[in-house]
Image: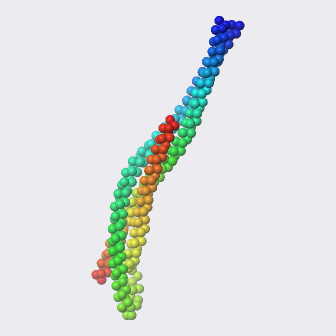
Amino acid sequence: MLEGLLIGGVALIIINLVVRDQTQFRLTRLRTELLGLRSEERRVADRRDEVELMVAQIADALMRADRRRQSLEKGCGAMQAHIEAIQAMLAGGDEG
Amino acid sequence: MIWVFAVVVVGLIAVLAELLLSYQKRAHELRLLQEPLRRRIRGHAKAMQDAVGGIQAIATEQVAEFTTQLQGLARRADELREALLGLEQQVLGDAARIAAHDDLIEEVDPNAGKIDAEETPEDSVHRAQEYLRQEVDGHRLSMQRDVEVVRRTLVLLEAKLRRGASTTTDNT
């Protein structure tokens, strides 16, 4: 009986040590994972900011391009009118 | 003696149970802390996908549309430039003829050309050239630049997303 308890006690001590080591290893891994997730979250948030800025830049450039297109169309129309006016002026001059 | 050993063994069992429980509790806490971070990462990724998905489709379509329109407008501007060049040559030819004629009649009426303050065809052509440079060529160049900005930013955006996707896959 005494021997049994002795052997059991030693075995329990060994089991305790093994369990402690293994669980500490698992906890360390979980802590590292948590730190990794924190930095990953920061990185993704930064990337999101950059992506949103780029999206805003694209939307802005598209709007600007559309306005320029309208101005260009207007400019071409006005230019056509200028040319017609000059042609009329020249035709009038020739007739005079 | 047996009692002492029995108590020690029971104590060791209690320590083992306590160890397992406390470690499980700590692991649970750590997992709980991870969950909001994972949720936030998923939220960022989804927001990026939504923002990029919408703008990518629109921008690709608009860039193609703008490029076609720009080509058409550039053709029209070139036609206008040709027409203006023709007018300029015509006006300069006329002006040379008039100058030659003025030289002949200068002795009779030296102030003949200065009385009329109205805009001459030369002035009109110069004004039209200026207008063409500022309002047509200027806007055309600006539009080209804007379309190029959109195209380049789209490429950068795609590269950034690809890089981001590969690093996220590596980390998970």
The answer to whether B147 is drawn above or below residue A22 in the figure is below
Residue visible at 40% across and 51% down in the picture: B59
Near-viewer residue (A18 or B60) = A18
Residue A70: horizontal and vertical position, in percent? 38, 60
Location of residue A68 by image quarter: bottom left
Location of residue B10 by image quarter: top right
Residue B51: horizontal and vertical position, in percent? 45, 45
Near-viewer residue (B165 or A1) = A1
Residue visible at 42% across and 48% down in the picture: B55
Near-viewer residue (A2 or B81) = A2
Near-viewer residue (B39 or B67) = B67
- Give the residue at the far top of this rendering: A1
Residue A19 makes an appearance in the image = yes
Residue visible at 30% across and 78% down in the picture: A91
- Give the residue at the far right of this rendering: B1
Residue B143: horizontal and vertical position, in percent? 42, 60
Quadrant occupied by the N terminus of chain B: top right
Query: How many numbered marks does the figure carry?
Result: 0
Residue B44 makes an appearance in the image = no
The answer to whether B166 is drawn above or below residue B127 in the figure is above
Residue B166: horizontal and vertical position, in percent? 48, 41
* B40 sits to left or right of A3: left
